[in-house]
Amino acid sequence: MRKSFFWIQTGLLAYLAITCHSLALANPLQKVKTFWLAKPTPQQQNAITTTQTQQTPSQWQTPPSETIVLTTQFPLATWWETFPTLTGLRTLIPQALAANPTLQAITQQVAIAQQQAKLTQAQQLPQVGIGASYLQQQYGKNQFLFPLQKRTFSSFQTPLTLSYELDTWGKFQNRTQQAKLGVLLATTQVQSAKIQLASLVASTYANQVRLQDLITLQQVIIKTYQQLLAHQQRLVQFKQASADSVIPFQQQLDAAKIDQQNWQASLQLAKHQLALLLGQTPANFEKSVEKSAIDSFIGQAFPTTLAGGHPSELVLHRPDVQAVELQLKQAGIEIAIARKEFLPSLKLTASTGLASVGLNNLFKWSSLSSYFQPSIYQPLFTGGRLKAQLKISQLQYEQLLKTYLGTLQTAFTEVEDALAVASANATVFQQVQEQTQLAQQAEAKATKRLQAFIAGEMPVLQARLNTLSYQQACIQQVAQGTIDSITLTKALGGGLPPISIP
């Protein structure tokens, strides 16, 4: 009889575990859950839809009859390979994405979020454990009305316990949904960090190439100033000019050398910044750069940028926009959880095991002990805590809705600013390029006059300085146009695929 009772208790525990697990997977009270599930109100849903449409500039709105398949391919996931003047990025950016310590730290957040999701999901399952305990207790002589034959007692227990809180209203399931959304949210943070890192590496490298080109031309400018100074000194030597006439040429030469020194210092800082982004020390980075080819903006055309007529999906797929969308979903689930806190909770507790006063009787069927305890709890008075929590959840949802609006406005503004700046710089480059061509023509004419012994060397050197100055301006504009393209790529989401939000 006792053996049969033990197996009945063990079977009951197993049945409870299976039943609790089934309740965690399939909730029979679907209608009640649907009623208490927090969904955006019609006003809130209209606000989200209106935010995505009203904040879309006219040139970003694609007519329904047009296809956007080809347009959404910009920017590419490896957009840095599209710059012909920055071939070094094909090595530097993958290296930074693999070795940057800050990015590696942010990437770890995804693994943490995944484990947090597993931890939250474990609450939907029954908790089963086994233990053992020993208790020794001594009673006083006058503690009882009747005398005790033995005042010291020892007891042993080996319980097998099961505890499970029924997820009747789907509250734990909502927590699991929140945790899974947290994994996606951590993924958007990693994507944002990758886009930020890639754009910083590209901009820093473009600045490094710009400074290197400026220094290269500055060396020619210094050499030209030296020739001008030597020419003027010869004029003074042959008393064809006063001694004071040398001073302006010497000052121009000194100013050119100072500019070169400043650019060299800026170039060194750019290399150090690039080494930091790549997770290297400046010394190791210098050695690796010496072995690689140096790109150049000299003689290059202005980089082409994306014109108008882009689909708004490019901006809506940005990681920061998707991050706020995920936070909105989490906030909606939090409202559902806050509402379900008003409902009763049902908890099942069961235990079976061996218990005896002495160790010699512990492993006998007569020592079998068990209990089964279902309990229900309905909050009646909490001092307004549950109502306050629900109100906080609703206010946080409204706050995130406004944050979403601001994020969309910022995203479209960044794209429009990048397009406007790129267009303005392209116009300036065209003007500078025209002036450069005129300066080259003037230098060619001065050279012909020198060869024909019609004019001296001074006009040729001055025309050459003018040409070099405009060439430096062209380098500045091409470099700025490249940085504008990088900024536009970053504003459009960096070419990374969007996250699928459930």
Image (cartoon, grey):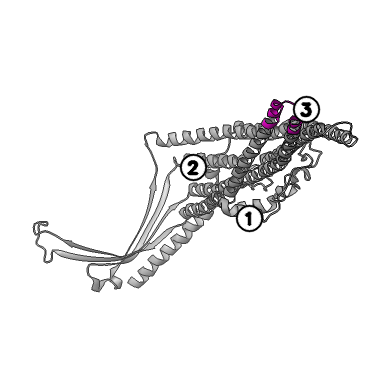
Q: CA distance from mark 1 to mark 3?
A: 53 Å
| Residue that label 2 marks | 337
Instruction: Residue at 47% x, 36% y: name it.
Output: 390
Task: Please report the bounds of the magenta region as a residue range.
Answer: 233-250
Q: Is residue 150 above or below residue 125?
A: below
The secondary structure making up most of the magenta span is helix
Instruction: Residue at 42% x, 49% y: name it.
Output: 346
Classify mark 1: residues with Cα within 10 Å, few (<14), some (14-19) or many (20+): few
Instruction: Residue at 66% x, 44% y: name it.
Output: 208
Callout 3, which amino acid?
Answer: Gln
Classify mark 3: residues with Cα within 10 Å, few (<14), some (14-19) or many (20+): few
Q: Secondary structure at mark 3?
A: loop
Task: Pinpoint residue 3: horizontal percent, then vertical percent.
Answer: 35, 72
| Residue that label 1 marks | 288
Residue 477 showing in the rendered view: no
Q: Secondary structure at mark 1?
A: helix
| Residue that label 3 marks | 240
Q: Secondary structure at mark 2?
A: helix
Callout 2, which amino acid?
Answer: Ile
Classify mark 2: residues with Cα within 10 Å, few (<14), some (14-19) or many (20+): many
